[in-house]
Image (spheres, rainbow, N blue to C red):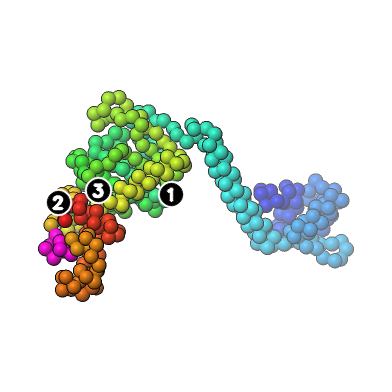
Amino acid sequence: MLEAAGIAPELEAVYRLLVTAGGATAEDIAQRTKLDGTDSAQVLEALVSQGLATHTDGTPRLFRAVPPDIALLPRIKQTAEALDTARAEAGRLLETYRETARRHDAGQLLEVITGAEALRQRLKQIQVNAREEMLWFCRAQYVAMPSGSNTEEFEALARGVRYRVLYEKAFFDDEGAIDNVAAGVRAGEVARSVPWLPLRLAIADRSVGIFPLVPGGPDGSPGEPTTALVRDSSLLDALVALFESYWENAVPLHFSAEGEDLTTDDFISSHQPALSPADSKLLSLLVAGVADKAIASQLGLSRRTVQRRIQSLMTRAGAGTRMQLAWQAARRGWL
């Protein structure tokens, strides 16, 4: 049982005798085992050399077991650390092997998935295996996974996987869609909305992605959907970049004022309330390239107040930069 710690079976048997007996001579060991006197002496000397036993200086020498916490635990710890190192190195070798295989075999990069059921199983699988982040493009009218049926998302969120999900406007026309999105947001999903999305897309840990090759399925297109699963590649990098470009300019989804449900008024850009005359003038000056100091002078405000109001407008628009604010302002009809 201690072979994993580098102790041979015959040594382990004698060590166990020393532990239970408290001490023994070579003759005692020979009597209790099938070893003769010479062999028992050699085994006892081997135990001493490996730090598992000590002996007295008299004749006959009395051998005693070194306490297991001193003799075994450090050895087991070293073995465990060596296994961890070997496991990590094996992982690196496996990744190198896969990278080499992908370079020589396109089948390692791209896998075609045919049918709604096969697609549904793959979408579940990549979420179960996700460890850091899931990225989603959610279009209207499901193909394989009806709204509200993705229980894997809640399990992944519970174990710390981050979800960033983009919904196109028409998605919320589906029955129950708003309530389902609200449930995801409550569980930790970070959600945004855009007027339109170019395709359906799911990416796990930026290492594997699923997207359509041929349309089809319950949305009215003929035949079963044909999708592709793509692994680490320039194509996957391009899909991640596509997601990020849409995410950057999307409208964040928020709870309603009551804190209970999401409503389309919270995030559809056409329902955004108009700006006040003061904010509208400030924004027009900002977009025109007027400096903060000059804007403050024009509006009779302090520079700090101008900057605070600009930040408020950025938050309202879900913009991370002033350039994004200008884009969102044009998109929402604020200018």
- At x 40% / y 43%, what residue is drawn? 238
The residue to which callout 3 is attached is 193
What amino acid is labelled 3 in the image?
A: Ser
Q: Quadrant of the C terminus?
A: bottom left
Whichever of labels 1 and 3 marks the residue nearer the N terminus, that label is 1
**Which numbered marker is on residue 270?**
none
Q: Nearer the viewer, residue 46 or 202?
A: 202
Q: Is residue 12 left or right of residue 143?
A: right
Q: Is residue 206 left or right of residue 84?
A: left
**In whole angstroms, how far apart are the C-alphas of marks 1 and 3?**
25 Å
* Residue sticking out furthest to the top: 223
The answer to whether one can see residue 13 in this image is no
Q: Which residues are magenta?
A: 275-282
Q: Nearer the viewer, residue 207 or 334?
A: 334
Where residue 309 appears, as percent x and y from the top left, is 21, 67
Tell me if residue 9 comes above or below residue 220 in the rendering.
below
- At x 72% / y 51%, what residue is drawn? 7
Whichever of labels 2 and 3 marks the residue nearer the N terminus, that label is 3
Q: Is residue 146 magenta?
A: no
* Residue sticking out furthest to the left: 277
Whichever of labels 1 and 2 marks the residue nearer the N terminus, that label is 1
Which structural element holds mark 1? loop
Where residue 296 appears, as percent x and y from the top left, is 20, 71
The answer to whether one can see residue 122 in this image is yes
What amino acid is labelled 1 in the image?
A: Arg
